[in-house]
Image: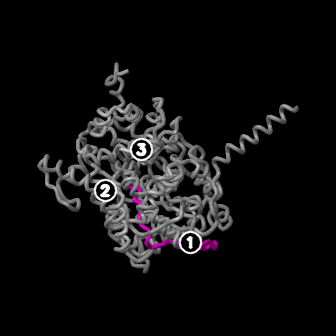
Amino acid sequence: MRDVRFEEGLKACMNCGVCSAICPAAEFYNYDPRRIVDIVQTRDDDAILELLKSETIWYCGQCMSCKTRCPRGNTPGSIISALRQLSQELGLFIYSEKGRQQFAVKRTVGDNILEYGYCVAAYVVHPDLHPEQGPMWDHAFENLEAFFARAGGELNGTEGPMRKIKPEVLDELDRIFRETCGMKLFDAIEEASEKKAAELGMEFRSKGIDFEYFRHVYLTDNGRHIHVHEHHDADHEGDW
Amino acid sequence: MCMNTTMQTMKETGKKRIWADYQKDIPDDHYFFVRSCIRQTFFPGSEQFFLNFLRSIGKDIYEDPEHTTCTGIGYHGDVVPFDTIMTVVARHFSQATAKGYRNIAISCVTSFGIYSEILETWKHFPETLEKTRESLFRATGREFEVPEYIAHASDIIYKYRDEIAARMKYPLMDQYKGKPLRIVEHIGCHYAKMFPKYGFGGAEFPHVLAGMIEAWGGEVIDYPERRHCCGFGFRHYLVQANRGYSVANAKKKFESMQPYKPDLVIANCPGCTMFMDRWQYTIREMEGTMYGEGGLTGIPVLTYEELAGIVLGNDPWVLGVQYHNVQSDRFMARMGIPFDRDMKFISKEGERLSEPEGLMV
């Protein structure tokens, strides 16, 4: 795989571990971005293949704080983005629980882009999927037209906030996705996810989010991802 | 004596050179405005204020209704390839080119980071620019010029912060205590952590929001986790099973800022603004904890546009100040802003809407 993010993001990592020290994900998950960069740097194909099937490449939150602090100017977050793309193109993301969640990201944000022209649009932030949005959003969601009108806009109008994106504009986005392999990535995520759903004996639908496999990947957490501070020393005794 | 003089000169030269890296040119007119998916979803009044304010001081800012998402949340959520997002953004540039604009004003911090990453990639790997030109032309028949300047919308408000101060009706002063209000500023990670030269003050000394607070009479709070991520984490918020990551990061920030007793939080990223409000509600629901005065209230979180708007005396309810779980009534009362609570939740035509229950004060 040739990706400029490998070239720009990785110049002789010296394994100092500053990226792991600053990383919010390393504080929360069993995660060490330094280790990922080190594996990629070795060019060991077997180790990289394992990485592409693993949970670990899905823990990064893409805050890119690592870019600021790396003394070599490397960007572990970008290397991880490139690995994630490769994992999906090869259908390897379905081997991990965190990887399988990409199907939920595709069916929400991915499909929103081509259907509405927005990654996130007010009318898809349904309170049932977003209980954390709280009572204010419940209110706004129930009164969306009034909410936008009061601010000086028109929901699904011709201009301003949350305007309706014209079909010919959506068609341009669609053609860009086909031209640049964006659609190919969508298809790869769909195809591998459908196979995984069949393997698990779960209901799968070709559109939407109201079915068993979507709910499974959107909601399931096996509880083994989180970094537990009090057990850290004992668990890793002798590792180094 | 001679040595001292020489050293002084060296120091000044060095200082100027060092600080030059933290400066940023912002064009003073003719902006092509690109909206944010998240800001227009949750804070439409903020984008409207930004446009209206610039037009009120005689600036030309144009919005093309055929502008779409940059796909940035999809890119950092890893379902949109880099080649695709470069071509979608190139389409935005073609819209600006067609209308004669070379300065892009960007509402979203994720988009701002995307635009920065793409411009830097095109500089360092010119073949990617050529490939993008070809892809865009084949897909849409469009062509484009690379813009001369990109600015985040907060950069532009920062540029005009003194003009706002000159027209200010309600400075950031506690009318009861006669002291400046104490404000936490949160800079979205993608504003300058990736490409420091694109932000005022870079990644180390970001001044874009602190400058506004100081110009409008407030006091900026420094606290240990000031530069920690709000916790969005893209896929970690988008997938419900992962939201523990997101709320845990926000909790870390609130616990760190609480001892400094902030009266308000502002952010330049629409996602951060939303999350720092929503997670306060969630933490209260989960464990009963609140981070405002005496643990009995929340800390209100506003967009910088909402803050600029109330400082200027705009109607807070049209700005959308009430559309956060943590209400800002007491903060505005301290500023001496008169307001009518009964007018919060009405339609544009004055029809009364249902009152949300369980908001935080």
Front: mark 1 or 3: 1
Amino acid type, residue under disc 1 in the picture: Gly
Q: Residue at x 37, y 61 (%)?
A: A119
Relative to A76, is A124 above or below?
below
For the residue pair A69 and B186, the one nearer the viewer reads as: A69
Q: Nearer the viewer, mark 1 or mark 2?
A: 1
Does residue B71 belong to the magenta stretch? yes
Say whether residue B265 is visible: no
Residue holding disc 2 = A131
Image quarter (top left, top right, bottom left or bottom right) of the C terminus of chain A: top left
The image position of residue A141, as x and y in percent, is 34, 67
Looking at the picture, how far across and down is residue B22, in whole percent? Answer: 63, 48
Total marks placed: 3
Q: Residues within 10 Å of mark 3 (few under 14, many from 20)?
A: many
Q: Report the front residue among B141 and A189.
A: B141
Q: Which residues are magenta?
A: B55-73
In the rendered structure, which amino acid carries the disc numbered 3? Asn
Determine which residue is flagged by label 1.
Answer: B100
Q: Secondary structure at mark 3?
A: helix
User: Gap in Å between the C-alphas at discs 3 and 2?
Assistant: 18 Å
Quarter-wise, where is residue A127 in the image?
Answer: bottom left
